[in-house]
Amino acid sequence: MPLEEIRPIETDLAGLGPVELVLIKEGDRKGNARFRGLLDRYHPLGSGPLCGAQLRYLVRCRQGYLGALAFSAPAWRVAARDRYIGWDEPTRAERLGQVVNNSRFLILPQVRAPNLASHVLGRAMRRLASDWEARYGIRPVLAETYVEADRRGSCYRAANWRMVGQTRGRGRQDHHRRRSSSPKGVYLYPLCRDWRDRLGGQAPGPKAMGQSQGAQEQDWTDEEFGAVELGDVRLNRRLRQLARDLYGSPQAQLPQACGSRAKTKAAYRFLDNKRVKLDTLLTAHHEATARRMSEASVVLAVQDSTSLNYSAHPLTEGLGPLNTRADQSIGLWMHDTLAFTPEGVPLGLIDVQVWARDPAQQGKRATRHQRPLEEKESLKWLKSYRAASALAQRLEQTRVVSVGDREADLYELFVEAAQTAGGADILVRANRTRRMTAEHGHLWDYMSQMPAAGELRLKIPRRGNQGAREAKMAVRHAPVTLKAPRRKSELPEVTLWAVWSKEVDAPEGVRPLEWMLLTTAPVETFEQACERIDWYTTRWQIEVYHRTLKSGCKIEERQLGSADRIEACLAIDLVVAWRIHHLSRLGRETPDVPCTAYFEEAQWQALMAFTDRTPTPPKAPPTLREAMRRVAGLGGFLGRKCDGEPGTKSLWLGLQRLDDITAAFVVFTGRSPPGVQRIYG
């Protein structure tokens, strides 16, 4: 059939309306003809032939057809894929039928809609296993695809596919090993959580996971910023270069970090560009965070607010008051949500809100009860929860829990969490007692009547003049039904679980610890109550992250002239601060991983040569823990038995020194400079 002319479409995802994947049924001549017409006309490989079993889809919206994609039989043997799965030859031959190849993917060149490609891939992955099983009776557990070396594969990374290596440049028909085709990136996407077990594979060791060929050729900025679309490849390159510069010198001002007048001018022009906005710059990092979240069974989305004080730069445009009129401090407010594993490893940001307060709104606290929530800053908690819920609905194998301190004790948040199907759970520390049903009275009174389910011991770090100690906590838990506040009587009742932990036998002169936690996650046993308390103790990590951002990246000392510039630079500093914080936790959680999972060869060799005071570094790289402690030593960490593991402050200071040490090492030894750094996480 003749292919009708496709009209150009330029809009965002919302402007497209619902995007539909139409599965072409067997025997559908019209659908197959349209599929072949689109692929033959617009795809460099054409429409086929495709190998073996296959599914074909058309992508359309109310404005017309947007593209097409196809899935077919997998490649017979791919070293990078098979190594990552952990296959031997017999197992590969037996289980290969559970792998499906995304052999074609096309978004029409006339269609310009940011994030459309990753959106389509995400929708396809959610239905692929069921569609394949319905047609062929086999449920696949892993999808694969191969991306040309001259393409970044941004849409696949944004849709949470993982690059595990590269092919060797041999095609299906290369029986004589001539390697006539170019190497391609190997990308995989698990379709279920236990995919490796179902494929009979063995999890690769740290070296295989941290040192694959594809990972070695990837730059961390490509992982965190590579999928950002600024409409100009020069802007995209400048973004990644600026991120590298700020990471190399996190405490330096922009001119010092850039290293030359030309790069500094280019950085200022970049920050002045109207396309460069905080939300836009963080899109790729949000997607990379989602990919890391998909590999965890439980993720804690911790949200908190912090002020950014620029009172030392009063001529900066676009700032607002931070506190009271008498205080006179000016700056910006930020409310961010950082994802953690229950062990405290930061996975990345999922939501960032930045704003300047309007001076005309000062003094309106007295009218807060008369204003709707939409007109208050408190709405920030619901926005963050909605971002967490969107990920919970998208990552069906991951439980997402939104964690907030006492400021998040909002009845509207409880209602929304209870009414959001498939959304994130909440875990909030109660700030006030709340009304319950008439027979139960108020929250604290009701919980005090519950028998203690057990005792939990918590290690309390040193605070001020109070030394470190171990607190013995009595734990109570029960389901509770809360009534709406009297001023919000139109809201429904909400049933939650309460976990009350209170310190017993506290030392004299020390205020006993007490936490009343409210959550939508069921708490039916003492073990579950202890788990919810452990989840909440992770919340303090976001305060460490904020300290890293302010003291490590010196964001409050940026002299950029306007709030718009500050916000654009803040987007990069947020990711840099996360990466430093991630390193400090990674060295504790995976200490025996080779340091090449994080450091370039020239970097670890320079580190070892400098700290050992020898011109010849060892042949084998140290573990990540050893390298991290040596880097921290450059930043003032003493490494005594009583010092524990390094913190973020000594790490960021050490990383800054390591950057200069590596540059000198390269000059005096003639080794290749570090060009790229590994993906991790």
Image (tube, helix red, strand yellow):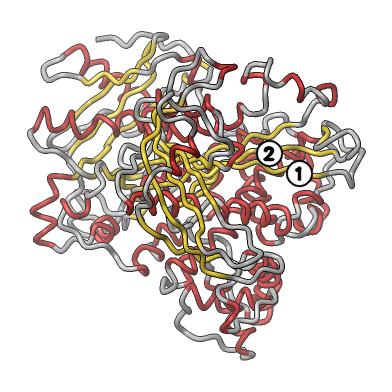
Real-space Cα separation, disc 2 to disc 1, in angstroms: 7 Å
Instruction: Residue 606: tell me if it is visible.
Output: yes
At x 51%, y 78%, the residue is: 626
At x 39%, y 15%, the residue is: 18
Along the line of sight, the residue nearer the viewer: 652 or 462:
462
Give the vertical position of 381 relative to 31 (above or below). below
Secondary element at image label 2: strand
At x 42%, y 40%, the residue is: 498
Secondary element at image label 1: strand
Horizontal and vertical percent for residue 121?
Answer: 35, 32
Q: Mark 2 = which residue?
A: 334
Q: Residues within 10 Å of mark 2 (few under 14, many from 20)?
A: some
Horizontal and vertical percent for residue 214?
Answer: 40, 57
At x 11%, y 17%, the residue is: 27
Label disc, if present, on residue 308 of the rendered structure: 1
Along the line of sight, the residue nearer the viewer: 557 or 235:
557
